[in-house]
Image: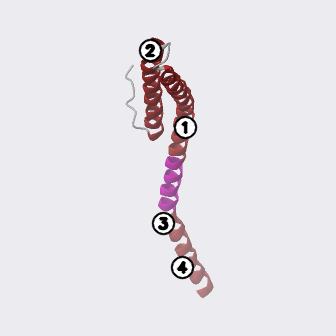
Amino acid sequence: MRFILLAIILLGGVFRMQAQETPAYDSLRREILALRVDVNDINLRMKDSKSRFQSGILVSTLGYSTVIAGGLMLGRERDQLGQTLLVTGGVTGLVGTYLLTDAFRVLAGKRKQKKP
């Protein structure tokens, strides 16, 4: 009789402990799922910003290389072409720089979403 009473008390305590662990398990599961969503969002932004980085670097490099070529032509027989290349390369370089900063905004998640 004592053994049965002792077994009931111990089993009751074990079931009570398991019932208390369930909410902690659910909240832990929710946190893990939230972290997975965050990681998936970061991966998506990384993929989106990669192409923007590459195009920004390419456009900036072309633009500033054109500026250098135009600067080398100044004061020589093709001075007008040099001035034109300076302006064109400067504008192209600035567009490339804007593309790079836009890629950083996408990566940071600070870019405003367009409404459909």
Q: Mark 4 touching mark 1, by CB under 8 A? A: no
Frontmost residue, 88 versus 5: 88
Labels 4 and 2: the sequence-earlier one: 4
| Amino acid type, mark 2 | Thr
Toward the front, the furthest residue is 76
Labels 2 and 3: the sequence-earlier one: 3
* Other residues around mark 4 within 10 Å, as few (<14) / some (14–19) / many (≥20): few
Secondary structure of the residue carrying tag 4 is helix
Secondary structure of the residue carrying tag 1 is helix
Q: Mark 4 touching mark 3, by CB under 8 A? A: no
Secondary structure of the residue carrying tag 2 is helix
Q: Is residue 31 magenta?
A: yes
Q: Which residue is mark 1?
A: 46
The answer for how far apart the CA atoms under marks 3 and 1 are is 40 Å
Q: Which residue is mark 3?
A: 20
Q: In the shown orientation, is residue 91 left or right of residue 2?
A: left
Frontmost residue, 89 versus 21: 89
- Horizontal and vertical percent for residue 46? 55, 37
- Horizontal and vertical percent for residue 107? 48, 38
Label drawn at residue 91:
none
| Amino acid type, mark 1 | Met
Q: Mark 2 touching mark 3, by CB under 8 A? A: no
Most common SS among magenta residues? helix
| Amino acid type, mark 3 | Gln
Q: Which residue is mark 2?
A: 84
Q: Which residue is mark 4?
A: 9
- Horizontal and vertical percent for residue 100? 47, 32
Point out the frontmost of discs 2 and 3: 2
Point out the frontmost of discs 4 and 2: 2
Q: Mark 1 touching mark 2, by CB under 8 A? A: no
> Dividing the picture into quarters, in which one does residue 88 lie?
top left
